[in-house]
């Protein structure tokens, strides 16, 4: 282990490591994938971007940026000429186009819960059948994996605690949805209802920036892609509050 005495030492050591990897690699330039900044407050996140600036000539950098870095005038200092901001929209789970998205979430559940098709086949019909528990959680998630897994986990907990069952049923999903609805309700502030109704189906450019960032960061508002265009939509569970 090398003793690290200062921030400069850390940066220099990182560059040395990257250069050594690049020298031995047959894959071309080193790519850094940096995740988690979307959960970081603006000032600490900016320090990370400042540190990365010195590595631009050494590596390819892929960063999951926070909402406050992707919207508004501050984005210009983070996304410099030659760089590209790629928005990863929620998974499509509605209508005919959502069939593949629902299947994606079924696969996510199988991996997270370590379920194979044989195990799912032993579950009640209301769990894995079309329109059952898995499909309902997928469609009510708004296409957000975190929301889907939270709904499913809460439904499983209700099934075990209230009824002593290993498999959740639609009634348990309804209870999980009620919990998420209450969480969303507590996040809403005066003026949010009208703003969410107004922005529904639009690109969001006329929405107050601070309000938009707050609602996007909490998953209350989703930026979808419809017919190749960005469109703002309230989360499906939030819609029941409007």
Image (tube, rainbow, N blue to C red):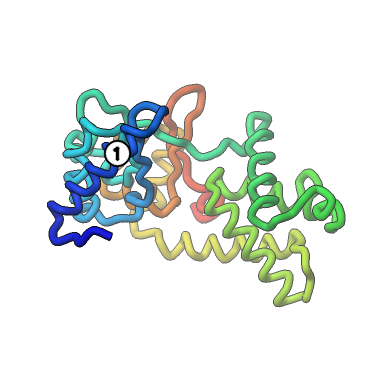
Q: Quadrant of residue 158?
A: bottom right
Q: Is residue 70 visible?
A: no
Of helix, strand and loop, which one carries label 1? helix
Tell whether 11 sits left or right of 203. left
In this view, 102 is above or below 172: above
Q: Quadrant of residue 83?
A: top left
Tell whether 189 sits left or right of 113. left
Residue that carries the numbered disc 1 in the rendered image = 20
Residue 106 image point, x, y percent = 69, 46
In this view, 24 is above or below 162: above
Tell whether 143 sits left or right of 22. right
Residue located 77% across and 68% down the image: 166
In this view, 7 is above or below 80: below
Q: Is residue 170 visible?
A: yes
Tell whether 18 sits left or right of 148. left
Residue located 20% across and 62% down the image: 3
């Amino acid at each position: 282990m090398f003793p690290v005495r200062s921030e400069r030492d850390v940066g220099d050591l990182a560059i040395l490591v990257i250069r050594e990897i690049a020298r031995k690699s047959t894959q071309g330039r080193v790519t850094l994938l940096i995740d988690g900044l979307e959960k970081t407050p603006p000032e600490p996140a900016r320090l990370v971007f400042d540190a990365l600036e010195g590595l631009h000539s050494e590596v390819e950098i892929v960063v999951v940026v926070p909402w406050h870095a992707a919207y508004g005038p501050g984005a210009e200092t983070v996304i410099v000429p030659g760089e590209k901001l790629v928005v990863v929209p929620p998974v499509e789970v509605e209508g005919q186009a959502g069939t593949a998205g629902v299947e994606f979430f079924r696969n996510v559940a199988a991996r997270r819960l370590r379920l194979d098709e044989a195990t799912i086949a032993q579950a009640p019909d209301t769990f894995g059948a079309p329109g059952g528990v898995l499909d309902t959680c997928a469609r009510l998630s708004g296409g957000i994996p975190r929301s889907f897994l939270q709904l499913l986990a809460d439904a499983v907990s209700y099934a075990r605690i209230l009824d002593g069952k290993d498999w959740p049923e639609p009634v348990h999903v309804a209870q999980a949805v009620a919990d998420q609805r209450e969480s969303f309700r507590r996040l809403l502030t005066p003026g949010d209802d009208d703003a969410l109704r107004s922005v529904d189906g639009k690109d969001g450019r006329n929405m107050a920036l601070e309000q938009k960032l707050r609602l996007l960061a909490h998953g209350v508002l989703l930026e979808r892609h419809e017919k190749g265009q960005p469109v703002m939509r309230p989360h499906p569970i939030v819609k029941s509050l409007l």
